[in-house]
Amino acid sequence: MLTDAQDLPVTTERPETVDAIDRFVHSFLGYGMDFQPILDAAEDDPACVVAQAHAAALMLFAETGDAADKAKPYIRRGIEAAQQVTERERLYLWTISTWAAGDYGMAMTAHKALAQKYPRDLAAIKIGQVRAFSLGDSAGILSLGEAGLAANAENHFAHGMIAFGYEQCHRLREAEAAGRKAVDMDRRDPWAHHAVAHVMETEGRIDEGLAWMQGLADTWENCNSFMYTHNWWHVALFHLDRDDHAAALETYDKRVWGRLKEYSQDQVNAVSLLARLQLRGVDVGDRWADVANYLAPRTDEHVDPFLDLHYLYGLAKAGRDAEAMRLITSLVAHAGKVKPVQQVMWQQVAVPTARALISYILGRFDEAADLLGQVLPNLHRIGGSHAQRDLFEQIHLDALMRAGRTEQARAIVERRLARRPNIAHIKRLAERLAA
Ligand SMILES: [Fe+2]
């Protein structure tokens, strides 16, 4: 039995394994790319449950259609060794094996139990926050963050982790304070940068947000592609809200799209930004075509409804009708087979939202507005952040306006203007609707 950098016992006799675990945890919490050592350790130390579970988690984070299959050999080895290990290690393996099996409800139960009993395990808590995020469980993100911070106040990652939990629970002052605290402790914490950017975005503090992110962007070069493209996606949103469409497009071309085009999260950021640019009336040229080339092979994956809806929108926008229709058909079939805890998100939210997106793209604006109007109150069930899901509210608003449903559109614009009174684009919409 050895001890890792968090003072957590690890059942192994190999110091190299513990070193690989420490490197994994640091890289995972910091959105780095130093992941080969844990894969090597998982091979060299088959009886180390933590190494097997970390390696399995890495496979799952790839979010490919075969991610669960790739995680299986590690989980199998972990289960074989699990009789001999500590409760924390067994619980951690449980979180990963239930995630791989698609049982997110059970995974969350294990995550919450683990965080309560072993709050020093920040990597497990972070993975729990990601699971809660994918279930639209903002309270879960925060409660896990609270457990992590109480036991790790000396660790800047814990402050960044709770910051995002606060933000998703609309506790913006606490979110900003925790995010700034993390950055004061270590300037290179991209998740803390991101949490503060969310606060500034939500409050319409666009000049401040742009300066905040641009002032820290030099630290993102060695981030993994999700964090790199997502933080730049936030920069592009600030440009958009400043009516600087050229800068938003340049950010898309140079930062958001092109890092790792095969990765789900890079694709989500690209689709979401191109869609928002078009909603502002910006000509995006033939950019959809390149994104769609990478979406086309994903029609039958269904890793996550939030991903599927972005893939669908990108395919349909690029005119890849055959793939878009295949995705919808496959999505409906998948929605009929998921575990009970995920039925609402797939059947009652993802399927009607997918239909709404197609209706919108086909110019059936009344239908799109009706469908989106019905699902928006429950849209958080598909996961994603408030800022990410706002795309669907923007599409709903655009559908209402194009359908000539001025009163309904005006109510939404007034609400958006009250939240962010200084955004020129929203003011213009309000004036147009008033006229
Ligand atoms: Fe974000």
Image (spheres, rainbow, N blue to C red):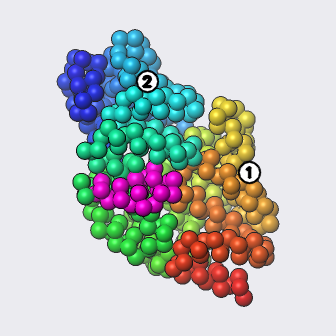
Give, as a three-letter code, the residue at label 2. Answer: Leu
Residue under the image location 61 percent in, 83 percent down: 428
Q: Nearer the viewer, mark 2 or mark 1?
A: 2
Give, as a three-letter code, the residue at label 1. Answer: Pro
Quarter of image, res 402: bottom right
Residue 115 shows in the view: yes
**Which residue occupies the foreground of this view, 276 or 394?**
394
Q: Position of residue 301 (x, y in %)?
A: 59, 40
Q: Position of residue 363 (x, y in %)?
A: 75, 67
Per the image, label 1 sits on a secondary structure element best described as helix
Residue placed under numbered mark 2 in the picture: 91
- In the rendered view, would you say 349 is above or below 78? below
Residue under the image location 39 percent in, 66 percent down: 254
Near mark 2 (Cα within 10 A), the count class, few <14, some 14-19 or many ≥20, is many
Q: Position of residue 380 (x, y in %)?
A: 61, 51
Q: Is mark 1 within 8 Å of ligand 1?
A: no
Q: Which residues are magenta?
A: 163-183
Q: Horizontally, is 121 left or right of 205 in the view? A: left
Residue under the image location 44 percent in, 67 percent down: 200
Task: In the rendered structure, find residue 352 and report the number of the disc placed on it.
Answer: 1
